[in-house]
Each structure stands twice: as structure tokens, then as C-alpha cells.
Amino acid sequence: MSARVGIVVYPGSNCEHDVAEAVSALGASADLVWHSETRLDAYDGVVVPGGFAHGDYLRPGAIARFSPVTVALEEFARRGGPVLGICNGFQVLTEAGLLPGALQKNRGLTFLCETVDLRVETTRSVLTQAAIPGQILHIPINHFEGNYTCSVATLRELRDQDRVILRYEANPNGSVDDIAGICNVEGNVVGLMPHPERASDPLLGSIDGRVLLEGFLAGAVVRR
Amino acid sequence: MDEALHRALGLTDDEEAAVRGALGRAPNELELAMFAVMWSEHCSYKSSRLHLRRLPSEAPWVLVGPGEGAGVVDAGDGIAVAMRIESHNHPSAVEPYQGAATGVGGILRDVFTMGARPIAVMDPLRFGPLSDARSRWIFEGVVRGISGYGNSVGVPTVGGEVVFDDCYADNPLVNVFCLGVMPTGRLTLGRASGPGNLAVLVGSSTGRDGIGGVSVLASAGFSDDAADQAKRPSVQVGDPFEEKRLIEACLELLDRGLAVGVQDLGGAGITCAVSETASKGGVGMDVWVSEVHQREPGMVPAEVMTSESQERMLAIVTPGHRDEVLDLCRRWEVRAAVIGTVTGTGRLRVLDRPGGEVLADVPAAALEEDKPLYDRPRARPRGLDELRADDPGRLDPPTDPGRDLLGLLADPSWIYRQYDHQLFLNTVEPPGGDAAVLRLKAPGLPATRRALALSSDGNARWCALDPRAGSALTVAESCLNVACGGARPVALVNCLNFGNPEHPEVMWQLSESVDGIAEACRALDLPVIGGNVSLYNESRGADIDPTPIVAVLGLIDELVRRPPGVTLVDGGLLLLLGRTEPNLGGSRWAAECRGHRGGTLPALDLELHGRLLALVAGLVSGGVVAGLHDVADGGLGVTLGELAVRSWLGWRVSGIRDHAELFAESPSRVVVCVTGPAEAAEVRARAATAAIAATELGRAGGDRLVVEGLLDVALEDATAAWQGAIPRALVP
């Protein structure tokens, strides 16, 4: 049985087709969902893709959190639906309060588009459940505001509850504790700055993103 | 009529007289402003058109040649590829971030208004030396502007090149190339037709930014700092988020067949768009100023008509589709307003409101088709013969060729790391190699296994010595880059960056350069499907070195594996395809290591070059070689050096006897790395069939770069020199 994936499209999103291509190649069916949509119950899993929602004006994700679809997303997540925020999608999820912390400008104050090594820290999230702890994944990053930060108390919580799912091997952007991705307490809502969909085809140089997307799709099917 | 007004607007006295002739009366201020922008060098190509005609532009696969928004070729499988290159040099000198950003925005509009989805941008850049604080400011601002706009609008920047040279210190070059793809049936031209049809202005509101951009900024040189600062209001301000929505709205408009013609608004704003669409369509048009969405109150009609506010386009729509078009735009949150109507009169009229007062009334054809055409005087630069006679081969050999080699290595990743070069999952070979290799894939496109290779190239050092030979060499190099990606070159666009055309030496350079490009393109069966001319690149009376930039599109019939790219394999055998002519004339070594810019350029055999292109593309697509790199800037030394630092592997080679053989930039050479003797034999056999020399150089491996009897450098030192070149220069 194939997972039905909804991919949220805000004005200014730009990775929606890439995510659709990557999850379709893994057997899922993918729909693009315009940001004015108020219902997501047709989907087994929802992805908020990368890009510049609403131009990233004011602050990345700050306007997107008020789009109707974001409200539907909160409801979808509350009921345990798998939600994956990639890059700008991660920023939207933190702005919407679905994940703690915030993404600030990179330490070097430049945009960074390059492939980095990530270490899988836990399999308790829907995204990392098919991976192996300690596994190194070669996956591209592409962001200006990818420097994860949070309060000391939140960081302690994230660590104590095993919610840091991916760490950078060589921290490219200044993220606290080398954090590249986190999940919520239940593990069904995940956000990461790297782009697994960009590492899903051998012609593009890496297929290490597949194990993450496969985990997410498996989690989506299980829920049906 | 105020005698000074036409001059202030950039028209000569003769041109003003021609306007009177076209109208049969004196123009009013608005009419004069409209002629001034349409007849500016930037819009009219009045100094260069005569020469551009000599470029070959036809081939069976060309769907649209020069003169439209973009050139278009048939890529097969029902897919058309559109491409265009433009300069945004002067705006970037005045306001680096916005100048570069709006350069990206403008080139995208040229492509998507023809129905093609932009899938790749490349940026050939030229700056003064980074030791100069102002050049650093311009360089960092331009890169940030391209990054800020290109990433946000959602089009990957997959290539480009950068050169630092004194001649660009006050006049940087920012050229922007864009490639788009479409199902062949979506191809749309910027034509108005059908009297009664509506002119719909789509996109951003119209403000006072960028007024006179093409006439004041792009069609004059720079003088002193205070006057240049005063030009700052002529630079437009970009909004990539608006452009992103405009792209989606435009492509849906054309997908659904709701527009009979679309034209982007670039230089000269509404005036240019309406006169081009009307004159090309052989119709007239009425434009109503009151219907144009204005960003601020109190704008006068001349401002509305010539504003270069960004992110706008003009769609010609039948009355029956009016509501559908407005609805579609509303859904994409893009502003749209009917601002005029197509008429059968052949007159372009500007009215203050529908049925209102006529503010301007000119024959549409006069703006576009009666534009001036100059055969400006040409003269071979004084001192050129002496310069050519001054052969750098007579310079003393370097005491330490290794140190010279390290000085010539520079990793450009500081630049392209700031560009999203992966979006759309097409980038098979990223920036930094010989050519970007892209899958041919986009939403709405038929599935295909074909792929594209792209390269942009320019070499002002060569062209300063010999613009004709230098331009031909540039075309040859760009084609070879594309062949290294496994592709066959199918089309070229050029951006001719030159100095002041009123200087006879500059016109001579331009004319020679056009002939050089034409000669190479004819020999290589490569149509020139579009281009741009940027003149008045001068500062304080000094012209830049002639800098023709070319971008070549290559087609790969079936992409089955990643091309190997610029890399070595441990223990691999290194072979040189082609022969070295030990001539240091015009070389980077002579210029950068010795400050010497004389000599004659190495010879180019275009017939041999064509055979080499086919040989190399076959070796790559056949999977015969494990790595390769063409020989260009910096000669064999830099080619081998880059292979080493990019693979973190050394090499040991022999048979390079002196610094001239190491650094000469003679064309038609490629270094290939093969895994073993069987592959080497295969390379030799194929090279023999193509009548191309194949010489064994040595072997890859170890942690030193060794040319027996000439140089011996630690890989670690080479890597540090390469990686640090740009970052070090930015922290003085």
C-alpha cells in the first residue's frame, strides 16, 4: 500500500516538486496542497518543503504560520499524523510552535549550499526510524538561516528526551550542539535543515536521503 | 521645445532631428522620453547592429533566433530550450546588490515570458583586484545579490566564472545567463495582434525606481564619484517573491492558452514593451496611464511610461479571456490591470485615461524599426603591433615554477556555495567543473533521457591582444568545456562587453570580435541564437579590455551515468589529448606572474578542434575515462593542479620541459585520467582514429605534484593555496 503524501505549497515555496519526485520514486503518491487549503485529512503524511514561503519577509516562516494550511497542519500533527519540515519547512514548524527553538542566520553570515555529513542520533522519530544510530548520511544543505538555537532548558529537554535526531559531523552554520534535525515528544513531527530529497538519485551523487524518506513513508502507511 | 532636454535624455541633435522627421512635427516631452529610451544604445543596438548581422544564426534545430526575448532550440522529444544572456554592469557598479539581483530578475523574465520555465542561471563576473577595498565591496555585494535573488526566486545558479583584473576596477562586469525549458507547443512570442485585444499589465506596481536606467546608466560611461553616486536612483530594486509568483502566473497563463503574446518589461519599461509588441505585430496600441498601478502619488506620465520597476510583464489577451486572466492572477496573488488595447491604426498612443486626453501619438514602427543605425569609425589601436611583437617567451624563466603554479590556483567555491545550485534535482555536475551538466526535466515537460551541458567563458587578456583570434579561442574553449561534460555543442549566446563605441579602437575591437565568433561558430556548426551588447564600459576615459562572453549549450542524447568530471583516481594514468604549442603570448602566467601582456596568441585549428570535441564527448559518454579537465587559463600546469586539489591526490608527470610548456594556453587540449592500461589503449585508439595526438604524461597518486626536472610541490600546499585564494583576499 502506498502512502498518500500532501506537500504544502506557500507562495514562495520552491522545493515542492523535488519532494514530490523523491517520494513518488519511493512509491508514494504526492499532491501539492496550496496554502489556502484548510483540510489535510486526505493524507497519511504531510511535508512542508523548502523555499522562501511568503518571500521569507519579516523572518522565515513568520508569515507562513498564519496561512490556513498551517492551522490544519497543527490539527493533523496533534492527531499523530507524520509531519516533516525540510529547511524552510523546519523554520515554519518552529514559528508555528510545532517544534521548539528557532533558526537564526548562519554563523558565517552567508548562504550555504553544499553537501555535509550527518550522523543519525536516534531512531525514535518517524524520519529516522529506518536508519541505524551512528550511521553517517551524505546530504546537501541549502540555507542562510539554518543556525539552530534554543533555550538551555529546551536543549536539556531535547537531549533528555532523545529528540535530537540528526547532528552535523562538521558544524557548517553554528547550530547549538551541532543540531541538524529534531522531533517533537511523540516523534511524529520532525524538522531538519538538510534536504533528503536532494540525495535520492544516484545521478545526483548521493542516495543517502532515501533511508530518511522511506522511514517517513513507512510511518505514514502504518497510520492508515 | 527645450533644446537641452533631448540631450539630457541621451539623444543626440541628429537623433532629435530624426524624431521630428518620423513625427512630421516637434515631439512633446513624453514623446521625446519614449524615443530617448527606445533609441538608447541599450535598447536599439545602434552601434553594434551592423556588425551583429555577420553572426551565423541558423540551423535546422533553431526555433527562435536573435531579436526575441530569448533564443530557442529544439532539444528533441517535444522539448524546446530557451536561453539568453544579458549584462547588468553599470547598475552593479553603482549599487552592487540590487544591480546584480535585478540582473537575475530581468533575465528570468526574458525566458519565462516565452513560455519556458527557468531551470538554470549562470553568472560570468569581472571585478577589479580584491586588494582594492571598493572592488571587494562590489564583489561581495554582487555575489550576495545573485544569491539573495536567485535562491529566493527559486532558480538554481549552476555555473559562471570570475576574473579579477585592474581594467574592471571602476567598471565591473555582471553578466547573467538563463536557460529555460518548455513543451515545444508552449512557445510564445512578444507580439501584439488582433485589434480590440487587451494589453494587460501583470506584476508589480509602477514606481519611480529605475527611470532612465537604459539611457542614463547603461548607455554612458562613468566619470567621477559624485556624478556616479547621483546615478543611484536609476538602479531598480528587486523583489524575488513577486517574481516567483509572476513566473507561476505567466506559465499557467501560457499553459492554458490565455495570452496571444507576452513581453517582459525590462529596460524602458512600458514604453519598450508596448512599442516592441505593437511594431513586431504590425499593429497600433492605446495605453491609458490612469490604469497603471502606481506605487506613489504624483507620478507624471513620462515617469509611468519609462519606469523600470521590476517584476512586471505585458500580456496581450483577447476580450473573451479577460476575466479568466484576472482570476488566474488573483489566485497567484499577482496584480493585473488592463492598461490598453490593440488598435489597427499602427499608432502608439498614450492617453491619460480611456477616452481621455492624448498625451503622445507616434507611429509604433518608428520607435522600433526607425531606430538609428550607425557605422561608427573603426581603427586598429595604436601600439598593438608593438604589443604583439613583445613575446613573453623572452622573459627569464621562473626560478620556482612551483610557486608560480600555486599563485595561479583559486577555488571559486566561496562564490557558488552561496548559490542554490541543486534545486529541481537536475544538477548532475555542479559548478566548479568544466561544464554544468543538468538533467532535462521540469514539471509539465515530457519525460526524456536527454541532458544538457552548459559553460560560460570569456578571456579579455586574449581579446586585448587580438579580438578576432581571442574571440574564436573563447568559443573553442566553451565548446570543449561542454564536450568534457559529454555533450555536443548545439547553440551559443554571447554578451559583448566593450568600451565606448565612440572610440574607433573600441569599434574595431567589437567588429573583430564578432568576426572571430562568427568564424569559430561557422566552423563548429554552432548557431548564435541570441546575445546582448554592453557598451560604454569605461571609467575616466579608460575602456575595459574587450570582453566578449559566450555561453554554450550542449546536448547529451542519453545520460546513463554521471560524467566523471574534474577528478583523478589513485594510480590512474594521465594522458594529454592534443599538442602543446609552447607560446606564452596572452597567457595568465605572463600577466599575473610577470605583469606582461604582450605576444601573439597560439594558433587555433578549428577543423582539428571539431574532431577533438567529438572524441572527448565520446570518451565521457562511453565511460572510458575516469576523470578529465580541459587545458585553458594557466595552461597544462593549472589543469593538472586543479585535478590534484579537487581529488586530494598528487601526480608525477614527465615530458613537460619548461615553463612555456607548463603555462602556455594553446587550445584544443584535454588531460584525461584512466584507470589502467586497457583504458589507456582505448583512448589512444580513439584518438588515432580522430587524428588527435595522445601523449602519456604520468600517473596519479601520492601527496606531491611532480613534473620531473621542473617542479615538486606538496599537495597540502597546493590545496591550501587553492582553497585560500579568495577567502584570504577578502580579509586584507
Image (cartoon, coloured by chain):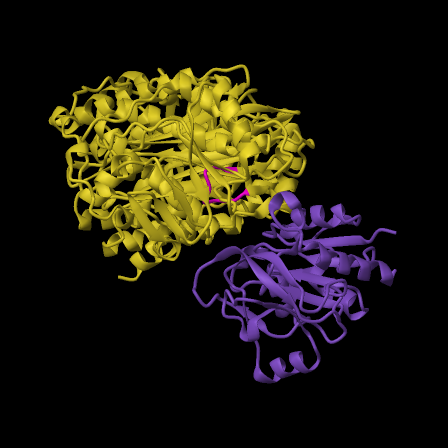
| Residue at the (23%, 54%) spot, across then down | B132
- Tell me which segment is drawn in magenta: B429-436
User: Where is residue B614 shown, x and y percent of the image?
Assistant: 50, 23
Where, quadrant-wise, is the C terminus of chain A in this rendering? bottom right
* Left-right relation of A11 to B434: right
Residue B369 appears anywhere in the view = no
> Does the magenta run of residues contain B432?
yes
User: Where is residue B425 shown, x and y percent of the image?
Assistant: 61, 45
Q: Looking at the colours in the rendered structure, which chain would you say is drawn in yellow?
A: B
Q: Looking at the colours in the rendered structure, which chain would you say is drawn in purple?
A: A
Task: Indicate whether B60 appears above or below B11.
Answer: above
Task: Indicate whether B710 appears above or below B195.
Answer: below
User: Where is residue B336 shown, x and y percent of the image?
Assistant: 56, 41
User: Where is residue B434 shown, x and y percent of the image?
Assistant: 45, 38
Residue B149 appears anywhere in the view = yes
Res B246 quadrant in image: top right
> Does the magenta run of residues contain B424?
no
Task: Indicate whether B661 appears above or below A108.
Answer: above
